[in-house]
Structure formats: C-alpha cells, structure tokens
Image: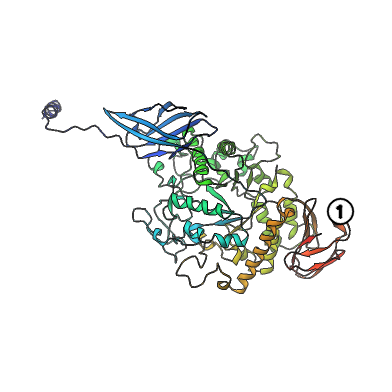
Amino acid sequence: MTQLVKLTVLLLLILRGGIAVHAQAIDIQKVHPLNWYVGVLNPNLQILIYGKNISASKVSLKPYAGVSLQKVHTVENPNYLFLDLTIDKTAQAGALQFVFSKNGETLTRSYELKNRSAKPQGLSSSDLVYLIMPDRFANGDPSNDRFTNLKDTLCDRTAHSLRHGGDLKGVIDHLDYLNDLGATALWLTPVLENNMSVTSSDGRTYSSYHGYAFTDHYQVDPRLGGNETYLQFTKAVHAKGLKVVQDAVYNHCGSDHWFFKDLPMRDWVNQWDTYTSSSHRNQTLLDPYASFAEKKLMSDGWFVRSMPDLNQRNPYLATYLIQHAIWSTEYFGIDAWRIDTYMYCDLEFMNRCNQALMDEFPNIFMFGESWVGSVLNQAYFVRNNLNLPFKSNQLGGCDFQVCNAIKEALTTKVQWNEGGANKLFQTLAQDFVYQDATKNVIFFENHDTDRFLHSINNDAQKFKMAMVWLLTLRGIPQIYYGTEIGMNKSRQRSDGDVREDFMGGWSEDKVNKFTEGGRTNLENTYFDIVKKLANYRKQSKALTEGKMMQFGPRDGVYVYFRYTNNEKVMIITNTNDKEKTIKTDFCNEILRGGQTVRNVLTDEKFSDLNAIKIPAGESWVLEVK
C-alpha cells in the first residue's frame, strides 16, 4: 500500500468515527515559586510553569487589581513557560487566576498572593551558631526514615555513608538542650529534597544524606519531615529565643534534580564537551595575570560529577534562584543564610542575590563558604578594603584563616615570631583588609574537617584553650554538633566518620549524651567548659560587642583584651608545657593601675596583676573590674 493510500484510509476512518482523536490535555506539573507575597519591594515576579508541551498553551490572567501579566516566555524546551508579572504596591492578598488554553481546551489555575510576616533577626557577634547535620543528630519521627517512592530507600546506622534517620522533629525535641548549652542560632545543613539515587564507589554505597544535592528547591526532604515540619521547626526555634540559619546552595544541584533531567535550555547548567571538574584554584579569580580560561575552569567546572554546575549567568535561572531565596526567607521565617561553595558561584550573581535579600529584609545576614589559603583571598569574597575591580557585598564569611590559625597555634612550636600563638596573633593583625571582621564566622571544625580533638591528639587542655579563643575572639563563633562532648574522629576514611550520630538521639541508643548522666566524666568536662563560656558570653557586652586589643605573644603566652567603656575582659593563654610568669606592664595602656579580677571559669578572685604565674597549657578568662 502506498503512503498516499495509507493516509487516505486513515482520513476516512477518522471522518467515519473509526478512530477517536483527542487533543492533548493541558498538563501542569510544577509552578514555582509555590506562591508569592504582596508588599515585596521588587514589583517583578517571574513564575516558572512546567508541564508536557506547556509552551503550546496561550496564557491569560483574569483581572486582578494591582497585578498584570506582562509577558509569556517560551524557551528551548517546550515543557516550560516563564510568566512575567508586575505586582504593584496597591495589590492585596488573594488568589490570581491564570487561564491556559490549547486546542480548544482551557484550564484555570489559582496562584496565591499572601501577606508578608517574616522579620529576620540576622546574626551578629552576640550569637553562638550551632551547626547540625539533621540526619545524624536525632530521630524524632522513625515513620519518615524510608519512603518506597523515593530513589534511595536505605537507612542503616551502621554504614557511615548511608542515611541514619535523623530529622527535624529530632532537633525540635532537643531545643532545651541547645538553649541550656548557650547556643543562640541553629545552622542546619541543607534541608531541601535530595531525592538522589544511591551511588557506589570504593566498595561503599553512598546516600545524599548531607543535603547538598538538591532535587527540588521548593520541597523540604520528606525524610526530614517535609515543608510542614520545617515550618513547625522554625516556629519552635523562635519560640525558644533562638535563630534559624538556612544552608543555601546556588552553585550546583543534584544530578537527579527534576529540572536537570529536563533542562529548560542548554545553558541552564555550565556545559563542557566532556565532564570537566573545577580546578578549585580560587587564586585565579583575583589574579591580575590569570587567563580567561583559568577563571572559567575555576567557576564553571563542576564541583563533582553528581552535582551539575548551575549557570547563574542565565537570566531565567538567576531569577529562579533569587526568588527562591526570598520565598524561603518569607515562607519559613529564616533569620540568616550560610552559602555553600560561595567562591565557585558567578560572583556578580551573588552580589545581585545578596542585594535582593538585603533590600527585602534589612536585618538578614549572609555568610559564605570560601575555603581558601590566605587572609587576602578570603577577604576578596566579603566586603573588604581592597582596591580591586570586583567588590563583593557579602556581609561575612566562614573564617577558615582563624580556623587554621587556632590549629597551628596548638600544634606547632614557637620560634621567635613564628609558630604557636604567633600564627593566631598574625592572622588577626590582618583584619584591616575587612570592612568589618566582626561579621566573620569563626570556628575550628565543621562537617567537612577532621574533628578538632583528633587534630590536637585528644588533649583536653588544648581543647579548653581553643574554646576560650573561639568564644572570646572577634567575630561570630560557630561550633559543630558534638564538639561540646568531645567527638574526636578523623575524616581520613570518609566524611561520614566526622558526621557520627549524637548518641541518645535514637530510641535504641543505650546511652544518652544529651544528659549529664549519660556522658562520661571527660565528656562532662568538655560540656561544662562550653556551657560556662557560652552562657557567660551571652551577658558580656565586652565579648559580644566590644573592641579588641591584642599583644604579641611573649614566650608562648598570648594576651588580648575585649572591652567596652564599661567592661573589660582579659584573656591569657599559656601555650607552653611549663608554668610561665609574665609581668603585665606591657598592657598598662588598657589595665591602668590596680584592678579587681575574677577568673570566669573558676570564679577565683585576685587583685595582683603585676606578675602573673599561669600554669602550663592553662587558659584564663579574667573579668577585670
């Protein structure tokens, strides 16, 4: 049968009703953002519509006071539409009605505009940030440990690389513990959906339990409790007087992200002819001699194969990410953002995103992860005093330089002006490069590093010294869950080793480290140091708001002051393995004569500061009256 005859027969069958012909139904699968808000300063909203061949639909907006549909964008992929709206300041909360029509069929879709209510508190040097990986902290709801409709159905606490079942309810259940410890803000590693397939490498199976491989920006992972539980979490945290820090990832997504599986357009991600990893050479971004190719390799190379590198220069993606940040802040009530892999993002985009958040939420705070090797490189990614073509507007950053300096101060020997506490002194002496160094978040361990105690050979005195520095230096201190009970693993085998479970967070645990009775004597020693300092810090204006004056280490003894017009705290640390006597005349400028002194950690009081004998490895925090 010829092709013409076949077509003729088919036409006759259709005309006689032998074959039923149906127009393809209008299929809308996703609408992002999920809703929007009246009173947003930026009147422009771009809504992403996703559905099978949705671009063939005509879209109109039923009349709504103060809202107009400006343009409907089609892109390379027919499964996407982008709707540009203007929402002026006269618009009221309510439901917009979009009408989609195609092949004689119409579909009306509601879209809610809500009133704004979020009032972010931000972060300041008055805070103590407590970092939690929810999957490893506490399991408050075992019913959400596994979902058969997700790609990863595994949950096994014996495997460091798999999910363990911790969730948001588990954190809610222990807010009193965190309050008692002295924390004021909770930073959770990402809570968004990571519906990633498990992978295998080196004989191990790996889950995306850490949260850094998003597969849907508008859904909290159901294994953590979903959107509703995250709302309950933020409300419960605020009710306890604590703050919420959300972990943002703009640089990449998970390879199972729904929009990566069906890209809106090719340049939604950074494309290479073959898989290309980032060079991780941050120096190229500020090197005046760097080639364009070197800069591109750093910024556009993928972080890892399973995390596609997003192209924030794509205007549709940039708007999508910025609107998501605003929506999340408003919807969940976020106080601050920690930004993952900050230096790998397009930095002009980051300035735009930061500014959009600061415009809408004047008290919001952002600090990013830029894991670099020098103070100058670190300063490049925050507000700084450097005369360079690019100027970052990021408020603060994760202070890896102070982190490294604390470790070096406790693990190297003093050699005149090198080693030991000299490293910490010299690092802080470079604060002139920052517009405001007090906005840097200081730490000595996190979820990507060895446990600090492992780095110092489980030395309790050195732990105490490091904690004294952390909670009395300038900046916003951050501790990692389990720091306070002396968790001490290395990540040499795998990252999972430094992301161990907090014992007592699971009903089957035989000990409960959240209680004094469940901790060993040594663990209670660590806990008591953190609690004593953290709670003293809360009421000390000198430590939370004061200026700093430091003195170059003398024979391994490091002295500095935090002070206001009305308060003064003197910190003395002896990094030596023998007692030292120091005369304090070198700091008469700030001591100014006879003083009454109380050791904050021991409550011991004494009045003679002319010659101080400080035992080997000892750390003193002296309240000077």
Left or right placement of residue 203 versus residue 397 in this view: left
Q: Residue 290: percent from the left, percent from the top?
A: 61, 38
- Of residue 565 and residue 527, the one placed in the foreground of this image is 565
Tell me if residue 621 can be seen: yes
| Count of numbered circles in the view | 1
- Of residue 288 and residue 332, the one placed in the foreground of this image is 332
Q: Residue at x 86, y 57 (%)?
A: 586
Residue type beneath disc 1: Glu
Left or right placement of residue 230 versus residue 243 in this view: left
- Of residue 542 and residue 378, the one placed in the foreground of this image is 542
Q: Residue 54: percent from the left, percent from the top?
A: 34, 33
Left or right placement of residue 370 versus residue 223 in this view: right
Split into 4 quadrants, where in the image is the N terminus? Answer: top left
Q: Residue 244: percent from the left, percent from the top?
A: 56, 50
Classify mark 1: helix, strand or loop: helix
Vertical placement of residue 321 versus 497, above or below: above
Tell me if residue 189 can be seen: no
Vertical placement of residue 332 versus 507, above or below: above
Q: Residue at x 65, y 67 (%)?
A: 528
Left or right placement of residue 564 versus residue 487 in this view: right
Q: Residue 18: percent from the left, percent from the top?
A: 11, 32
Split into 4 quadrants, where in the image is the C terminus? Answer: bottom right
Render colour scheme: rainbow
Vertical placement of residue 409 versus 70, above or below: below
Q: Mark 1 packing: few (<14 Cα in 10 Å), some, or many (20+)?
A: few
Q: Which residue is tagged 1?
A: 589
- Of residue 29 and residue 68, the one placed in the foreground of this image is 68
Q: Quadrant of residue 353?
A: top right
